[in-house]
Amino acid sequence: MRIFGQFGPAALGFFVAFGLACKDSNAPAVTVTGLARAGGDSQATLTGNQLANPLRVRVLGSNSQPFRGATVTWTVTTGTATPASPTAVSDSQGFASTTVTLGGAPGAVAVQAAVANVTPVTFTATACDHPVLAFPDTLAGALATTDCRFSGFYTDFFELPVASGPQGIVLTLSSGTFDTWLELYLRAGSFLGYDDDIDSGNTNSQLTAILATGDYLLAPSSYNALTVGDYTMSAVTRPAELAGCGIVWVTRGVSVSDSVTTGDCVDSTSGSGRFYADVVALYLTGGTVLKVSHHSTAFDAALFLRNSSGISVAANNDSAVTTTNAYIAYSVVTTGSYLLFVGTNDSVSTGAYTLSISAATTLSGSVRRDAGPEILRMEPLRTQKGLARRTWSRAGS
C-alpha cells in the first residue's frame, strides 16, 4: 500500500507550516555592498560613434556573492555622450551593462555608474575629432597626450570624401619631430592600407591609392608609441594609374585602364627573358573572396598574388582555354596585406590592359558585411617590395 497517497490537504498544510517554522527568521537580509568596473573602461572612438564595447559593472552583496536585481544608474558627468538606457538591472551574476554613443564634442568623456548606498564607479572615454581634408589641401596638426590613443599610439583622424571614383590620390604625412605612420580606412571602419617611410632615408609617410567612390578616414600617427609632436597632412589627386614600380593601394570595386611598360617592375631572374608588371597593394580580410580580372589585347596577361610574408597564394595565366586574359578568385585565409602583380606571361611584352577588382567579397557575388566600425592601429609590418612568383624590381635595378 502506498501511504503517500493518504496525505490530504491538511497534511500538506502541516508540512508547509513546518517548513516556514524551520526558516531562520533572524538571518539578516542581503544588501548591496559593492560596485566594480567589469569592462569597457578607457575606450576611444570618433565623435558621434558608439563605443565598441559596452560599459559593464558587477554588483556584490553583503554575503560576498553577486547581487541580482540591483538598479544601476548611468550618468554622463564629463563631455557629451548618450547611454542606451539611463538604468540597467544586475543579472544573476551581478552584471549590468549599457552601450554608449559619444556626442559631437571631441575630448574627454566620463560616465558614472551608481547604485544606491554604495560608492559609484566612473568609466572614461575619448571622443576623437575628424575634420574634413579636401583635395587639394594641407593641414597642420599635432599629436598630443589629449588625443585618442590606440594600443599606446596617439592618433588623429581626418575625413576624406571621394565623390567620383576611381580616384588616384597621394597622401603625405610629414613631421620634423617624429617618425610618422599613416593609415587609411573606409569611414565605416574597414582597414584599407598604411605607409611607414617614404624610403630608407625619409621617415615621413606617403600613401598612394586608387579609391572607389565613398567616404574614407585618414589616421596620422607615429611609428613609436607615446610619441607627440607637430605634423602636416596633405592630400592631392593623381591619375588613377599604376605606372612605375611604386606600391599603390587599391580598393575593391575599382577598374583601372593602364599599360605595362619597360619602366614598370621587371623580373629577369628566371633566365628566360624580362617580364614587366605593375603592382597593387591590397588589404584583405580572412573569410572573404578576392576576384580580379586582367584583360589585354596587346599581350598574354598574367596575375601573381603574394601575402605579406612573400608567399605565393594565387596566380593565373589564362582564365580559359580560348582566352589569354587572366582571372583570380582567391578565398582569403589570413587577414593582412597582399601584393598583386599585374603582368605579362610573355617576355619583353608591353601594352595596354584593363584591371578590374570586384566589389563582391563572396563567390556568389554578394558583398560581405564587415563587422561594424573598427578603428584600430594595425601592427607595424611593412609590405616588402619585390615579392612575387617572379622576383620583381624596379627597371634598371
Image (cartoon, grey):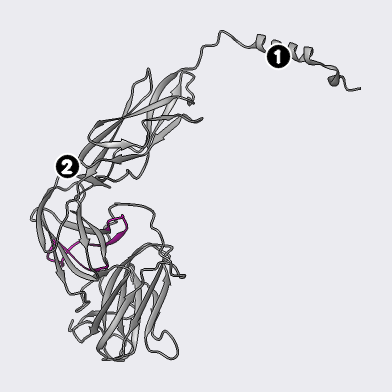
Q: How many callouts does the rendering have? A: 2
**Residue found at x 86% / y 17%:** 6
Q: Which mark is residue 16?
A: 1
Mark 1 or 2, nearer chain start = 1
Residue sitting nearer the eye, 215 or 305: 215
Please state if 340 lies on the left or on the right of 259 as rendered. right
What is the residue that sits farthest to the right in this orientation?
A: 1
Which amino acid, mark 1?
Val
Identify the amino acid type marked 2: Thr
Figure quadrant of the C terminus: bottom left
- Give the extent of the magenta segment: 186-212
Q: Residues within 10 Å of mark 2 (few under 14, many from 20)?
A: some
Q: Is residue 89 magenta?
A: no
Say which mark, if any, is on residue 145.
2
Q: Nearer the viewer, residue 372 or 379?
A: 372
The quadrant of the image that shows the N terminus is top right
Element marked by disc 2: loop
Are the residues flagged by discs 1 and 2 in contact, CB closer than 8 Å?
A: no
Q: Position of residue 85 (x, y in %)?
A: 37, 34
> Looking at the image, can residue 223 be seen?
no
Q: Residue at x 39, y 27 (%)?
A: 72
Q: Is residue 190 magenta?
A: yes
